[in-house]
Image (cartoon, rainbow, N blue to C red):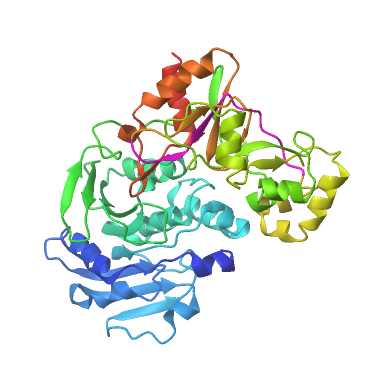
Amino acid sequence: MKNEHLRNCQVETPHEIVDLVWRLACAKRANGRFTSVIDFGAGDARFAKNSSVYDEYTGVEMDKTKVAGLRLPDKAKVVVADAMVWKGAGFDLCIGNPPYIRHHHLDPEWRAKVLHQIALESGVKLKQSGNVFVLFLMLALLRTHKNGLVVQVIPFEWVSRPSASPLRDYIDHNKWDVTVYRFNTDIFPRVLTTASVTVIDKSSHNSKWSFAEIGKDGQIKEFEQPSGHATEVLSYENRQGSLFGLRGLSPGGQDIFVLTEEERLQFSLKKRRDVVPCVTSLRAVPSDLRRLDADAFNRYFVTASKRCWLIRSDLEKISSELRFYLDSVGDRWKQYSTCTVRKIWWLYRPHPKPALLMASGFVGKTPKSLVNTIGAIAVGSVYGIVSTEKKLPQQVAEKLRVFDFEQCVVSHSNNLKKVEVRQLNTVLAQLNS
């Protein structure tokens, strides 16, 4: 793992949540006890404190600073090592809160070795796009014995994201029973994902997936589908036909490639020649706005000092003014991997002007969406909806505003929902059929 992300990847589990997780684990065994417990990514080993329910606890933690000076129960120990290469298996229980690191922050060589080792042990080829907690969940399954129990505090999103599909298939192949408890409150204030306690019981072979909402007090409310409603989660479809969703452009750091009106004027950059309109967020626009025309763009973005001008560095021949601006960036571009992998750091691949703009995140039933009259480029978390037919956008826009996304997507972060672009393609295909 990259050291800078290793230092920030773990959020300590509140002690009351540690106790709750242990109660869920003990409830799965008749005697409520475990002979051997393993905790990968143990942090300060706070899961070791519940020593009355186990005979032996082993924590594995890579960060030496986390374990320095720890005072542990006599039955507990912590090993400083990379969990993915540490040798040990046959445990009754794997419990804990594994690290959360996005795939593009993982060291490619380390990730390749881990994926190769997992494939050798299990025959499962996990996706490179998986978060590191997916690797840790797979490791938990491999290091517990054939009737073992896995209880992990991980993001709820794993139950539906394509990046975790090989792991879910592996669980289904073994017919293990899974219960996922989605927290109904924010237990990690600075983490923008919905947390869950995932329980995988390798001693039970009914191929049963159960879902429930749980509070800090342990109160449980069961629900039928991962969406939290009776409706199944939207499937993921590739783009097809004359209408499809497109992820927002990621040229590099928005602080470099997307300027405010004040910054545009400061560097004497001309509209169209040096910059074009773009939208990085729809939070500022009112929910009843239907069309992003020049007046609306000026009101909600330009005069509001929002970052709304995308520099035209997608062109090899640029003006002297834009060249001067790019020179003023200095070395700031080096902190963005998107820039460092390019031959010319600022030369990004352009996106088409979409017919519609849609927010990926939302609160309520449906994301904000706008007919893109001004021709703004969708950037970042804003999706573009591209159409090859002129009449489609207005018709689709009206249908999108009444489509109930809330019923068929997985909770992203408490009240915040998020629709993935391939899920949007599923909806667009339905609306256009």
Location of residue 319 by image quarter: top right
| Badge count | 0
Q: Quadrant of the N terminus?
A: bottom right
- The C terminus, quarter of image: top left
What residue span does the magenta drawing correspond to? Answer: 347-364
x 49%, y 45%: residue: 125
281 to the left or right of 338: left
Tell me the chief SS of the magenta region. Answer: loop
| Magenta-drawn stretch contains 387 | no
Q: Reply above or below: 12 against 395.
A: below
Give me the residue at 51% from left, 28% from top: 370
Residue shown at the point (45%, 59%) measured from the top left: 100
- 348 inside magenta stretch: yes
* Depth check, front residue: 385 or 262: 262
Question: Is residue 284 or residue 77 the one in the foreground?
Answer: 284
Give x and y (percent) for residue 399. Answer: 41, 20
Q: Quadrant of residue 276?
A: top right
Name the residue at 84% across, 40% down: 318
x then y, percent, for residue 37:
29, 69
With 107 as the anchor, is 127 left or right in this view? left
Camera-side residue: 119 or 421?
421
Residue 379 visible within the image: no
Q: Give percent across and percent down for residue 117.
A: 51, 56
Q: Is residue 350 left or right of residue 180?
A: right
Residue 342 seen anywhere in this rendered image of the structure: yes
